Image: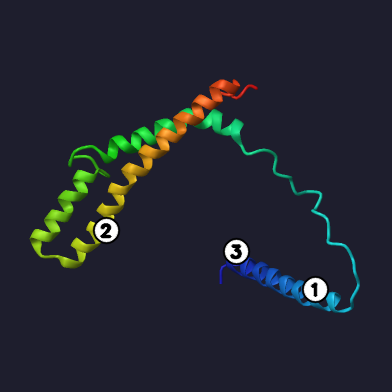
């Protein structure tokens, strides 16, 4: 057996045993009827602050470029990998060859890929509203 595999397995076993001991100890202490307060959050845990708007304002231009690249690829011709036209051609070829299972599989992929165009278009519209909101707040560059 590989030393790394043995070490990983041993650590996993220790973690499992520790979790079992912890869960077994909780009902026992609860049964004694002691009314101890709920444990406070650990000091190392960070509290969630805000909704991440500043980071989203900074990332918005990159997200928009990514959405635009995906839409360009999806709407390209049959010579472009990942395009709807190329997958449609594959569906047609499978149907012409009588490969029913392949045809069904590819047609489901085609349906999903076509639905992605609507989803990405909606995300781009939503992102443009977010970018406008960021500009009104002065967060477009993430400095405020």
Q: Which mark is residue 26?
A: 1
Residue linked to disc 2: 108
- Observer-side mark, 2 or 3, equals 2
What crowding class fits label 1: few (fewer than 14 Cα within 10 Å), some (14-19), or many (20 or more)?
few
Contact between marks 2 and 1 (CB within 8 A): the answer is no
SS at mark 1 in the image: helix
Q: Which mark is residue 56?
A: none
Left or right: 133 as drawn, with respect to 41: left
Q: Position of residue 5 (x, y in %)?
A: 58, 67
Ranked by sequence position, the earlier of labels 2 and 1 is: 1
Q: Residue at x 61, y 37 (%)?
A: 52
Residue 134 to residue 115: above or below: above
Ranked by sequence position, the earlier of labels 3 and 1 is: 3
Contact between marks 3 and 1 (CB within 8 A): the answer is no
Label 3, label 1: how far apart the Cα atoms are: 33 Å
SS at mark 3 in the image: helix
Label 2, label 3: how far apart the Cα atoms are: 42 Å
Label 2, label 1: how far apart the Cα atoms are: 48 Å
Q: Residue at x 89, y 78 (%)?
A: 32
Q: Position of residue 6 (x, y in %)?
A: 61, 69
Residue linked to disc 3: 4
State the colouring used for the structure image: rainbow
């Amino acid at each position: 057996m590989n030393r790394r595999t043995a070490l990983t397995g041993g650590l996993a076993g220790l973690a499992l045993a520790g979790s079992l001991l912890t869960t077994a100890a909780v009902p026992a202490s609860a049964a004694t009827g002691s009314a101890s307060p709920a444990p406070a959050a650990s000091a190392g845990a960070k509290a969630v602050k805000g909704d991440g708007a500043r980071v989203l304002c900074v990332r918005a231009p990159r997200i928009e470029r990514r959405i635009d690249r995906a839409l360009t690829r999806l709407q390209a011709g049959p010579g472009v990998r990942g395009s709807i036209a190329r997958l449609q051609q594959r569906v047609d070829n499978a149907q012409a060859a009588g490969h029913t299972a392949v045809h069904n599989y590819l047609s489901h992929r085609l349906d999903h890929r076509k639905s992605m165009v609507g989803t990405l278009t909606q995300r781009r519209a939503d992102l443009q509203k977010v970018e406008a909101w960021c500009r009104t707040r002065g967060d477009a560059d993430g400095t405020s």
